[in-house]
Amino acid sequence: MIDKIKELEKISRVLDANFQERGYLLNEITDYSQDYLEKINNTSAFSFDIDKNDAISDFSINDSGEDIKAILKSLDRHVNFSGANTLSSKYFGYIPTGSIFHSALGDYHAAIINRYTGLYYTAPGPALLENTLIRWISNILGYPDNSLGNLSSGGSISTLTALVTARDAHNIEGDEINKAVVYLTSQTHHCLKKVLHIVGLDNCIVREIDIDDNYRMNANKLEEAVISDKKHGLNPWLIVGTAGTTNTGSVDPLYNLSQIANQYGLWYHIDGAYGAFYLLSDEVKDRFSGIEKSHSIIVDPHKSLFIPFGSGVTLIREGKKLHDSFSAHADYIENIMEKTEEMSPADLSPELTRHFRGLRMWLPLKLFGISVFKAALTEKILLARYFYEKMMEIKRIELGPYPDLSIVTYRWIPEKGNPDDFNKLLLKKIQHEGKIFISSTKLNGKYVLRLAVGSFKTHKEDIDVAINVIRGSAEEIEAG
Ligand SMILES: *Cc1c(COP(=O)(O)O)cnc(C)c1O
């Protein structure tokens, strides 16, 4: 047996890279990513070429290992340039992101140290770093000191965490489920309904409240619905306000919704996945008034803080409720320390073992300070307004509402023919050419195009290119 162990040791030791091996691999990968970052902004904003068979063959795992250079080459062929180029300054689709370099360094280091960050006891420093970051976010959103939160992988999981807390806080279970009413709008993100399904609340009553011309919830209609539901013996449970809708970037009347929630005793959840960090910008700060009166908020640093995908935040105003819903005990996790004031991430989320995701967020904030992020967010808002005003000068363009935040909707009204068909064709042409990437949506049954500004790389020159591409492509289609 000893011989066998020795033999296996010899093989398994390659997993433990030594100083020289680490140096070699680091050089390979840093040269490679430097080269990538130099060229990625000038490559197509979208490309959908994939040789599936070739890729699957390159991706398959074999008994023996391969050389790093060959592996990186296969990433170049199948991965690095695949689909929408979210690193392009001309990426305006869905909700843009970006991903600042400094975050990648945080991730690298987080994986290097690989502390067990689920529990305060096993990683007090990392847990405290994350808790401090969460407190900072709570503060900017106006939540009190007894609020608690969690760093999640994104908006959908944050919504899940918030809604489980809301469900438990209002005892929505058993026969109560059929009587519980959720209020949202046609503009609410689809993850809300998905989460209701996941948490066993499919049988809740979901009311879509009317919206105004700016796609914001009509607070009067909400109040009417709540009163009527109460009268009919139902249980108005949850108001979902959105601070920055995905379609148009609209911010619901957050303060008015908070008053209704308060008066009638509902849980008030705010979906700020895309928009809530825009509160850092003085240009739009006032729109968010009332956000601090909600019971839960979600916000995605992987959208408006330019952090890589996999970064969300859940905040619960009355932190104890989050803890009540998610804390759990097991014999094999013993805390030999005295009870501490600090919370463990595992007691505030569905996860136990987890990525130390705080570092990717914290490092850039620490390096630059908040002022740089404030400036970048304000720039994005002004760029959206600039785009809107420039598009107003184009005769054939029909615009949606003036942007609350950084999303503009518009469509080209062709000389003749169906506008929906025309704009579908226009989008297809623009995406196919790949100079810019935009996306589409439906508003009041009409097909419209969207331009969402949000990459840290996007500046005025990129907006000018977008305007020229949109106008030029439409004119080419018109010309036949
Ligand atoms: C993106 C988005 C979500 C979902 O967040 P993910 O991080 O994609 O899971 C929820 N709500 C709004 C308003 C969004 O824009």
Image (cartoon, grey):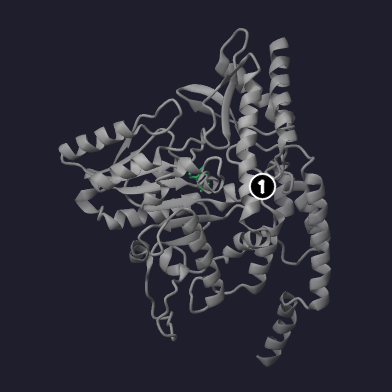
Q: Residue at x 56, y 40 (%)?
A: 283
Q: Is residue 243 above or below residue 310?
A: above
**Considering the image in quadrants, where does the C terminus appear?**
top right
Q: Residue at x 56, y 45 (%)?
A: 281
Question: Three-letter amino acid code at disc 1?
Answer: Gly
Q: Is residue 458 visible?
A: yes
Q: Residue at x 41, y 44 (%)?
A: 192
Residue lying furthest bottom: 2
Q: Quadrant of residue 227?
A: top left
- Is residue 227 toward the left or the right of residue 353 in the image? left
Q: Is residue 123 visible?
A: no
Q: Quadrant of residue 66?
A: bottom right
Q: Is residue 367 above or below residue 393?
A: below
Q: Where in the figure is residue 449, as x and y percent of width and height?
A: 58, 26
- Is residue 324 toward the left or the right of residue 365 in the image? left
Crowd band around label 1 with a 10 angstrom C-alpha radius: few (<14), some (14–19), many (20+): many
Which secondary structure lies at badge 1?
Answer: loop
Q: Where in the figure is residue 250, as x and y percent of width and height?
A: 48, 35
Q: Where in the figure is residue 54, as x and y percent of width and height?
A: 75, 46
Residue designated by label 1: 98
Q: Where in the figure is residue 368, as x and y percent of width and height?
A: 67, 58
64 vs 48, nearest the viewer: 48
Q: Quadrant of residue 3?
A: bottom right
**Considering the image in quadrants, where does the N terminus appear?**
bottom right
Total marks shown come to 1
Q: Residue at x 42, y 82 (%)?
A: 334
193 vs 146, nearest the viewer: 146
Q: Is residue 408 above or below residue 283?
A: above
